[in-house]
Image (spheres, rainbow, N blue to C red):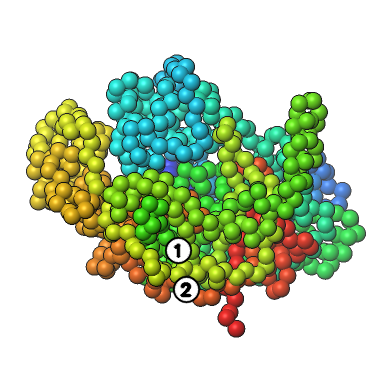
Amino acid sequence: MAADLGELLVPYMPTIRVPRTGDRVFKSECAFSFDSPESEGGLYVCMNTFLGFGREHVERHYRKTGQSVYMHLKRHVKEKATGAAGGGAIPRRRNGKVFLDLELNRDFNGEDYEYEDEAKLVIFPDHFEIPLPNIEELPALVTIACDAVLNAPSAYKKQEPESWEEEIQVSRHARSLRQLDNGVRIPPSGWKCQKCEMRENLWLNLTDGAVLCGKWFFDGSGGNGHALEHYRETNYPLAVKLDTITPDGADIYSFEEEEAVLDPHVSEHLSHFGIDMLQMQKGTENGHHTDNKPRPRVSEWEVIQESGMKLKEVYGSGYTGIKNLGSSCYLSTVMQVLFSIPDFQRMYVGNLQRIFDYSPLDPTQEFATQMAKLGHGLLSGQYSKPPMKSELIEQVMKEEYKVLNWHQQKGISARMLKALVSRGHPEFSSNRQQDAHEFLLHMINLVERNSAGSENPSDVFRFLVEERVQCCQTRRVRYTQRVDYCIQLPAPFEAASNREELLAYEVKRKEAEENMRPPPEPVRARIPFTACLQAFTEPENVPDFWSSALQAKSAGVKTSRFASFPEYLVVQIKKFTFGVDWVPKKLDVAIDVPDFLDLNRLRATGLQAGEEELPDLMPPIVLPEDTRAPEIDEAAVMQLAEMGFPLEACRKAVYYTGNMGPEMAFNWIIAHMEEPDFAEPLTLPSMIDPGPSAGDSPTGAAPLGNSPPEESIAILTSMGFPRTHSIHALKATNNNLERALDWIFTHPEEEESDALSDMADTEPNDNAFSNANSHSDSTLSPDGDASGPRVKDGPGRYELFAFISHMGASTMSGHYVCHIKKEGRWVIYNDHKVCLSERPPKDLGYVYFYHRLSSS
């Protein structure tokens, strides 16, 4: 028999591999479905790629790859016989029956259930089976490979420690950092570089509290390098990036060590400047991040989750829950809402077979495949089956509430999709709680990027915003349009309908504080939704507005209106803010959000009769006072020149890569060797004649068509992007490097010939509409034909169909649930639990979703 098995496996030996370091073994879940070893058909693991497949999908992989040998894993779960010894512990490796390195299903009580694992090799297409272990009859290589697969850790267990944070070392300056007692206190917002007008990519020096701009550090954002200049002048080594500070840490850079570093004492160093945010501590409870301090209103948790009510569980298509992976409820709620929208259902579930058939060899790394997998899992009803009638009777007789049918899964796990969509993102790739609204915008961006050349379901959220900016001195106006996906509504406390009650509470709270008594019961502000809309439509001041009519800075006001209405409207209530001590606070408000909404009165009107437009001019280029030659690391230049490259090319390479070392400069050289001016001398705007654009222009201002800064172009081309495409990207994003990078990704080179729209804004994009750029790792900027078919305009009448609610003091802690209206009834989705809602808490929502009503 041994000889027969050896001869049988000989033709397949070249395809059987032993997992090496770095190989991920997917033996807990199918790449196309949520089948697992506990499913009825078990799981098949390819002995070459180590991908896992359920019974319905393994044939597809065999036909596509020709791989014939699979390990079939099956876990049997059975109830212990009456009178069996209990003890409370689930048996592991007892009698060798539990040998798969898998998480045990928590749905089964360890006192009443036991596990028995089974493994065998299956050879396709004949389905010839070889039971394992079978050491004596199998060739040595096959035995080693089988043992390695059985003992390999879960693919995701292997991934979780792999974070970029693991590679960062503690700075040698952290322990002995000197901090000046100069009285500097940093406010929680409104930062600006102390040497220029930059309001992004700002770094706080941890020695003297100076706030200065960076120069294209690792996050790709732009700046004028004043933080580095400050270090060269003072030798103060450590700086923290202001917009990265969270209770869990911050991005810290050491100028002296020339790399990102860790600072174990960052909380103390920040508190020196009045930033106490990092002193907040968080814990976990049942997979949800919770604050150790008492919640401001315990009732918020009870009301939103509808605790204390006998909610009826629902099963079937569209009523499948998503298991909490540990503070992953932000993802679960967003995905439940997205897959309740017909466009997403049609794109991913309607095209399921086509997506699966054309998936790459590793479907775990393909966005459309994983979206189709999750959508099918939620909508098929396959993983949401009610218990059998006999089991219900048994349950009542035992008066216990536990899982009765082990084939019936309590929700599905979105672990594979989460690993894919969060890859490379410093926040979503962590196990911390996140902002559901930010994740929604992140998903819209990913859908946008992965829908090139096909239907884009995120277009249902897409609409145009008309911004009207008026110069207060000349009364002249400018109208611009841009694309957006969400509106943000403020919650004006002054408009609360229970204002007197709030004032009385505040008096009682202060009295209790002064007399060292317990505080009174908090009073929640009740704000009319009409007041939120009113605050949203009011004009707002434009900071640092440059009037092209005056050719100088002037007071300016801006108003925003809908230039088009989306098919699905996303409304976020701005509930979260920061106190002066940097502690994030959640506004305790209730908004009487209506079921029906009419926004037609907010339709944009365009240029009105009697209005005069501002000249179409950009601010003049302001040359820096210091026109000395740029500082260049001559040692790095000579190191490159010794390799045979032209000296001037080496100087440019070192300069345009920010003196970040010869390796970065070498990559720049490789990317630019074919350019005609490769060996030409380095020239910069501050070192050359600015040309006639400013001085010879009748108004002294630069026209909008001016080329972007050469340094910005060089940064993009050093990353391998063509020069022409880089220029187009910078022009389309008002020379914002971070937005330009995302513009390149969302506008393939074959579209370069399309006419570019002159829609670049000259004023800061700080308004009540929520652009994906301001809340996510990428930007959805307008296409050249933004008013084309991608904007599904229509009447501005809507009906509420879903909302996401948050419980807790901060988006970085707490828990999310969502309510969705299906088949005329509200349903609550609370992780894996799906029930009919008795009292949907519409007034306590965070993000609301409306669908457009027909004009009839």
Query: In the image, residue 105 lies at what x, y percent?
Result: 68, 51
Residue 493 in the image: state x and y as whole percent.
65, 48
Location of residue 787 by image quarter: bottom left
Crowd around label 2: few <14 · some 14–19 · many ≥20 (10 Å): some
Q: Secondary structure at mark 2?
A: loop
Residue 780 or residue 358, whichever sits in front: 780
**Marks 1 and 2, how far apart at CA:** 13 Å
| Observer-nearest of 518 and 449 | 518
Q: Is residue 841 left or right of residue 693?
A: right
SS assignment at label 1? strand
> Looking at the rendering, in which quadrant would you find the C terminus?
bottom right
Few, some or many residues within 10 Å of mark 1 (<14, 14–19, 20+): many
**Which residue: 43% across, 49% down?**
542
**Residue that sits furthest to the right in the current view:** 397
Residue 792, label in figure: 2
Which residue is under mark 1? Answer: 465
Residue displayed at 86% across by 61% down: 394
Which amino acid does the dot numbered 2 rest on? Lys
Q: Residue 396 lies in what quarter of the image? A: bottom right
Three-letter residue code for mark 1: Val
Q: Is residue 298 left or right of residue 101?
A: right
Q: Position of residue 15 (x, y in %)?
A: 40, 57
Q: Is residue 506 above or below residue 329?
A: above
The answer to whether residue 429 is visible is: yes
Q: Nearer the viewer, mark 1 or mark 2?
A: 1
**Rendering coords of residue 802 (x, y %):** 64, 64
Residue at 58% over, 52% down: 490
